Image (spheres, rainbow, N blue to C red):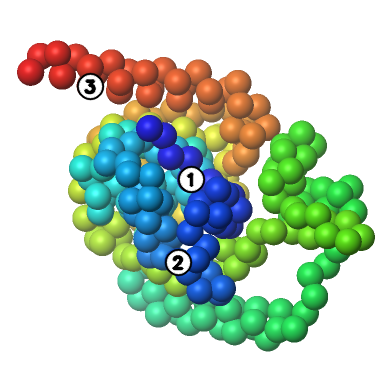
Amino acid sequence: MLLLINEFFLHRNSLYLKLFMLLHSPVFDTSGPMLLIDVIFLCAAVQWKCFSAIGHSMGGSIAAMFSALYPEMVEAIVLLDSFGLLPAHKKEINNIIRKGMDEMIEYEKKMGGRKEKIYTFEAAEERLKATNPFLSDQSAQTLLERGVKQVDGGVVFSRDIRINLTNIARMDLEQCLDLQAQIKAKLLLIQANQGLIKIFPQPEDLFEPIQKGWKDKSTIVTVEGNHHIHLNDPAVVAPIITDFLQSVTAEDAANQAAK
């Protein structure tokens, strides 16, 4: 069983929403802890006891944290251009939390009573590409097929843009390393050479210990491409992921046969 955790899961734009919208208040919480709760609700609903997860970007962080909290449930993880765990300097965490809260207040003020903007499909595509310049035309169209809904006069975006606000659920390096140590799943980290490490560089004293932790317990593959390589050119990453998951399945089968 395979769980994909990507932008659409995080934006409540998946089948999961149809299954669980009655379990949540109309104002969804997009913070890390609540997204982890979403995953456990989903697993309970479909009665998954053990699965593999593929997570892109923040979705990779959710997959990694879930695997640390529920190691018995996750057999394998694929992190697609994701830091997996993103620590902050301890002295900065208070400022980060305040910044995120201030952004949420401003967002609510701005959006209160405001009607959703209606676009033509073409205008929506241009808007998406303007905010995500690394997307190819085909990737933008693919995202929009699931990322907009039809209304009178055109389409509106169905994503929850609060996911772009500062994440207030941050941990320091020690906490992240403790979580990382709890992960028992087989792990594949695919890094794009023009991806997060280029567009969102992290302080070396935070990045290097986490990266070393992944190297010690996972396979790391660097590919040519940007943060959306899995969308723009899936043929680059698909064989790597397939080989990894098949190796995990084969190893498990061998272990079962040996018992």
Sequence-first tag of 2 and 1:
1
Q: Which mark is residue 224?
A: none
254 in relation to 111, above or below:
above
Q: CA distance from mark 3 to mark 1?
A: 23 Å
Q: Visible in this render: residue 78? A: no
Give the left or right position of residue 72, taking residue 130 as reference.
Answer: left
Residue receiving disc 1: 5
Task: Give the position of the N terminus as an image quadrant.
Answer: top left
Give residue 170's position: percent from left, percent from top. 39, 67
At which x and y percent is residue 246?
A: 37, 18
Q: Is residue 115 above or below residue 213?
A: below
* Mark 3 Cα-neighbour bin, 10 Å: few <14, some 14–19, many ≥20: few
Q: Secondary structure at mark 2?
A: helix
Rendered residue at 28%/38% (across/down): 50
The residue most toward the left is 259
158 and 248: which is toward the camera? 158
Give how far apart the Cα atoms at labels 2 and 3 are.
35 Å
Q: Which residue is label 3 attached to?
A: 252
